[in-house]
Every structure is written in structure tokens, then in C-alpha cells.
Image (cartoon, rainbow, N blue to C red):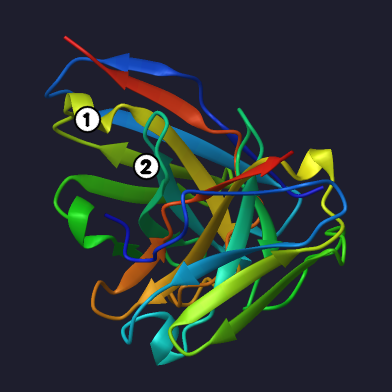
Amino acid sequence: QSVLTQPPSVSGAPGQRVTISCSGSSSNIGAGYDVHWYQQLPGTAPKLLIFGNSNRPSGVPDRFSGSNSGTSASLAITGLQAEDEADYYCQSYDSSLSGSVFGGGTKLTVL
Amino acid sequence: QVQLVQSGAEVKKPGASVKVSCKASGYTFTSYGISWVRQAPGQGLEWMGWISGYNGNTNYAQKFQGRVTMTTDTSTNTAYMELRRLRSDDTAVFYCARDPNSSGYYGDWFDPWGQGTLVSVSS
């Protein structure tokens, strides 16, 4: 059971917009700790997608965006493309555990 | 370019120890930290701990305290993660990843990641 809760799967057709939620608590996201997002393509290492809640590293398309509200965070992907099919993970710091925690991951299927 | 290259796959018996290396290049090793993350087959990501590239200070996840040791060698820009008393459920891919902080662990992001090292534990 992950400290941060993500939906196991989401799907969308090419060109559509999808969102992936990341639900936490008062000891992590709700305490104001930053949320970061990663994309993991099949058989590869995770890649940083969003850092500090809403910042994109150089090279990440602006189709990807992150936001926070209360004890939850969201990753939005617009203009869905076949190459976006991957697993997505959120990460934050948890003060009760004194360390980083990940969401369980969400598998995005492009229909 | 910034790169982390990890050591090769390992096969271990239950009760044994494994030591995985992570060689950094393309940046000033002592200005960053290194975190270790593991991923069991078909499962999600799990943070194991962090080590400062500057002074070797560590912050281990509670779950692994007493069983993991993270070290660095600044002469070769290499980080190491040793996990002891291996069990079959330790079978996983272990990743190292660069952390932007070397002074302390603040739950920052990981970028980039190493290619991963598969550790298989079986009798």
C-alpha cells in the first residue's frame, strides 16, 4: 500500500487530454512538500517529467503540466500521443517517514 | 552529458549481501546527492535512501535502516549501495539517481537515473 495514491490505470485517445491524480495526506502533499512526476517507458529507467509541483525540465514538452491542491496533486497530459503510453509516478516527501514516498504508479494507455 | 552508469546484474542467495555501484560523470559529484530507488518485478518505485556526494551524510528509509549502507568514493565519483541479509522479496531492479542537494535530504527530485541493476535473490 503506497503512501501516495494513484489510479492504477487511465486511458485516452490520441489528441485527448488525460489527468492522473496523486492523493496524499497532511504529512506529505498537504504539508506543503513538493510533488515530482516521472515517466517510465517499458523496460527503461524512470525519467523526470515535472519537478517542484509544476516545473518542466528542459526537453519535456509543454503538453505535460503539474498542479497541486490541498492534499492532492495532478499531472495533465494534453494532445495525447502514442509515445506517451507509459507508467507515471508521483513522488513527495513525508514528514512521518522522514523520507521520500512514491505513488503506486499509473499505467497510461493510448487507445 | 550528465550520466550515471551502474554495475551489472547480480544473482545472490538468501542471507547474502550485494553491493551495487553507480559511477557519475558530466557534473561535479560533490555538489549533488545520490538517492537509491528499487523496483520489484511488475511493481512500483520505492525510495531506499540518500547520500551526500559532498560529505557522505546519509538518510535511509526507515524500512531499510540496519540493512543498507550507502557510501561514496569521491576520487572515482562513484556511489555504492550495499544491502545485507537478502531475502527473496529483495529481488528487484535497483536504481541510483542524482539528487540536487548535497547538504541534506529535502525530498527533492531525481534526475537523471542510472540504467538500473537487477539483483535476483534465489536459493
x 23%, y 78%: residue: A96
Question: Can I make out residue A82 in this image?
Answer: yes
Measuring from the top left, give residue B12's x and y in whole percent: 26, 16
Q: Say which of B29 and A96 sits in front.
A: A96
Q: Say which of B95 and A30 sits in front.
A: A30
Sequence-wise, which precedes: disc 1 or disc 2? 2
x 46%, y 49%: residue: A8
Question: Under tag 2, what secondary structure?
Answer: strand
Residue B89's tag is 1
Q: Quadrant of the rendered structure where residue A29 is?
A: bottom left
Q: Is residue B54 above or below residue A111?
A: below
Q: Is residue B37 above or below residue B104?
A: above
x 45%, y 78%: residue: B106
Measuring from the top left, give residue B105's x and y in whole percent: 43, 73
**Quadrant that contains the C terminus of chain A:** top right
A91 sits to left or right of A61: left
Q: Amino acid at mark 2?
A: Met
Query: Badge 2: few (under 14), some or many (20 or more) residues near its Cα, within 10 Å?
Result: many
**Chain ID, mark 2:** B
Q: Say which of A71 and A10 sits in front.
A: A10
Question: Can I make out residue B57 in this image?
Answer: no
Comparing labels 1 and 2, the label whose residue is closer to the camera: 1
A79 sits to left or right of A44: right
Instruction: State the residue position of label 2.
Output: B81
**Quadrant that contains the N terminus of chain A:** bottom left
Measure how far apart labels 1 and 2 are at the Cα level. Answer: 17 Å
Q: Is residue B15 above or below residue B83?
A: above
Query: Badge 1: few (under 14), some or many (20 or more) residues near its Cα, within 10 Å?
Result: few
User: Pointer 1 and pointer 2: residues touching (CB < 8 Å)?
Assistant: no
